[in-house]
Image (cartoon, grey):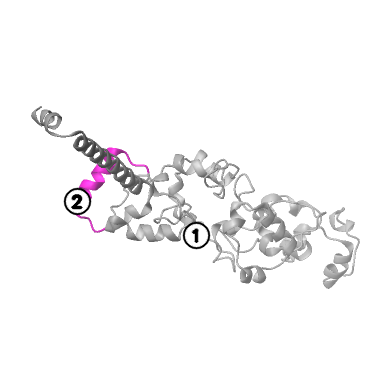
Amino acid sequence: MKWLSWVKESLTLKGKIIIAVLLLVIIIGGGVVAFKFYDFTQNNPKFCISCHLMKPAYDAWKKSEHTGINCHECHHLTIPEQNRLLITFVLRRPKSVPPRHGKVIVPWKYCIECHWEKDKKYPDAKKINDSRMHAKHYFMEKIECSKCHGYEVHKFTPEERFCLRCHQGKEVHGVGMEGLACLNCHTDRTVDLRPGRKKCLFCHGTEAVRKELIADDTIDVQFFQPDKAMIKKAVKINVPKDAPMQFFCYKCHKPHAKIMPIYGTCLNCHPRILNVGRHKMHIQTMGLECKTCHLPHSWRVTKEQAKTTCTQCHEYRDLLTFIGPQG
């Protein structure tokens, strides 16, 4: 090559050294610039807002729980996908982010990297490896994380009634419960996610019960606690530890269907009760409701109660005569 021969013959040693140093500086400088450019495009969320479409998403990210997490830790694009986005942006100049058309933007496998076992980089990330709610919705129902978390750009905590998008017809009809979030009642403590008795007592019980539930730190109490006004308004109940029928509240109360239990509700579990003692006379003939004698949540008719309740209609009689032989 002529220019190489010219360098060897015409330049002094000093000139050759200067050229070598300049070339070395250019190579090193170019490498540094290339690395910084790569680092900026791959690890700096501000690169994303170089596209005008991403400004709303960037602002939402800044306010979200994921602020401080690099975009590419969640959004993984192949080289063809990156080039396709670039070409689309340059040639078509879209004015808004195109719809997903069912595409999962962030697959669950990336979410699980931080939200499963303890993650060294993000130790405060919420763990779901012992969450029944996530076990049912993802592992059993195969619902992607972004179906509930991220249905709006960078909004990760579902809104209060978001569940109704899939569970249609499950609006709450209970008086005073209309404004509750789904997870104010449904809990991560039970296998079927229905409210356990203590979850109902979060509003309808004592402060001691609330403290006990909060100490469990399950997802439903971490993010969806009823406000103080709702708790104060709720009717407080007492369930004696020795009361019969220690079952879940929803066996009688159906907040998605009707407001209060009725006579027919009792017959679901006690279909033959009318044939026992004087129940038929009291219920069908006199028109009394079950709860007139069987006080809700304690259920057992005591001698002290009978002396007050029964004597409103007749003189006091031994309780055994109610269920004994009819004379």
Mark 1 sits on what residue?
161
- Residue at position x 24%, y 59% from top? 95
The N terminus sits in image quarter:
top left
Is residue 145 found inside the magenta-colored segment of the image?
Answer: no
Question: Main SS type for the magenta part?
Answer: helix
Give x and y (percent) for residue 4: 13, 29
Is residue 84 found inside the magenta-colored segment of the image?
Answer: yes
Give x and y (percent) for residue 188: 61, 49
Give x and y (percent) for residue 239: 77, 59
In the displayed structure, 50 sits above or below 192; it is below
Instruction: Give the magenta-colored segment's residue range.
Output: 76-96
Q: Amino acid at mark 1?
A: Arg
Q: Secondary structure at mark 1?
A: loop
Q: Amino acid at mark 2?
A: Val
Give x and y (percent) for residue 284: 71, 61
Question: Which numbered mark, 2 or 1, is in the foreground of this view?
Answer: 2
| Residue 102, visible in the rendered structure | no
Which picture quadrant has residue 292? Answer: bottom right
Question: Label 2 to label 1, Cα distance in Å?
Answer: 40 Å
- Residue at position x 89%, y 62% from top? 303
Q: Is residue 274 left or right of residue 130?
A: right
- On residue 70, the disc is none
Q: Nearer the viewer, residue 167 or 81?
A: 81
Mark 2 sits on what residue?
90
Specify which label sits upstream in the sequence, 2 or 1: 2
Q: Residues within 10 Å of mark 1 (few under 14, many from 20)?
A: some
